[in-house]
Image (cartoon, grey):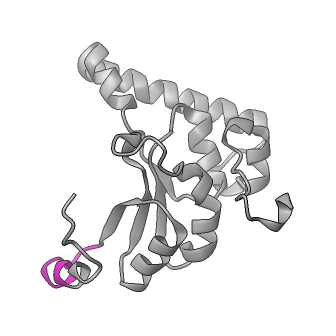
Amino acid sequence: MDPIISYDDLDVIRDMWPGKIVVKGVQNVSDAARLVEAGVDGIVLSNHGGRQLDRAPVPFHLLPQVVREVGKDATVIIDTGIMNGADIVASIALGAKFTLIGRAYLYGLMAGGREGVDRTIAILRSEIERTMTLLGVSSLAELEPRHVTQLTRLVPREPRDSPART
């Protein structure tokens, strides 16, 4: 939480690092666009599990707008709120390239060590496969935003000032 870090620091990082740069913790569309304009290769929509501010934006609700704004120019990743395989499917359907699974693997690790992590991954895999089967798709490439309407817990809400809500 260093208040002196700014977008200008990306130039310094780029000079030091020849690889790809991905910024985690993006919480709005304008920051996503500004980061891509500054040359990052990807962004991670994340509120860090709400640890800093429990009323921070829900990354899943930002996903469609951010993908529309920067998805052609940068990899969009989502973190925070991934509770099961259906959440992963919904995120991919709305344009995320992949998801992070937050604490799920840590719970598996605490419960059973390496075997617990393997079990966590197996559970997520089976949930992803079941969700895709129920949606009638056989590959991630077939997923589209229309599939998310079947997963109502995650349907993005319209902003309050949106014409759709007037």
Quarter of the rendering containing residue 41 = bottom left
Residue 16 included in the magenta stretch of the image: yes
Left or right: residue 78 compared with residue 134: left
Residue, x 79% and y 45% (percent of image)? 149
Q: Residue at x 50, y 39 (%)?
A: 81
Q: Which residues are magenta?
A: 12-20
For this view, does 25 lie left or right of residue 81? left
Residue 12 picture location, percent across and down: 16, 82
Task: Note whether residue 95 is visible.
Answer: no
Q: Quadrant of residue 36?
A: bottom left
Residue 94 visible to the viewer: yes
The residue shown at (33%, 19%) is: 116
The correct choice, above or below, for 107 with respect to 103 in the image is above
The quarter of the picture where the C terminus appears is bottom right
Residue 131 position (above or below residue 144):
above
Describe residue 155's horizontal placement relative to residue 88 as left or right: right
Residue 109 image offset from top left, x and y in percent: 28, 23
Q: Where does residue 46 sit, x and y in percent of width and height?
A: 43, 52
| Quadrant in the rendering for residue 8 | bottom left
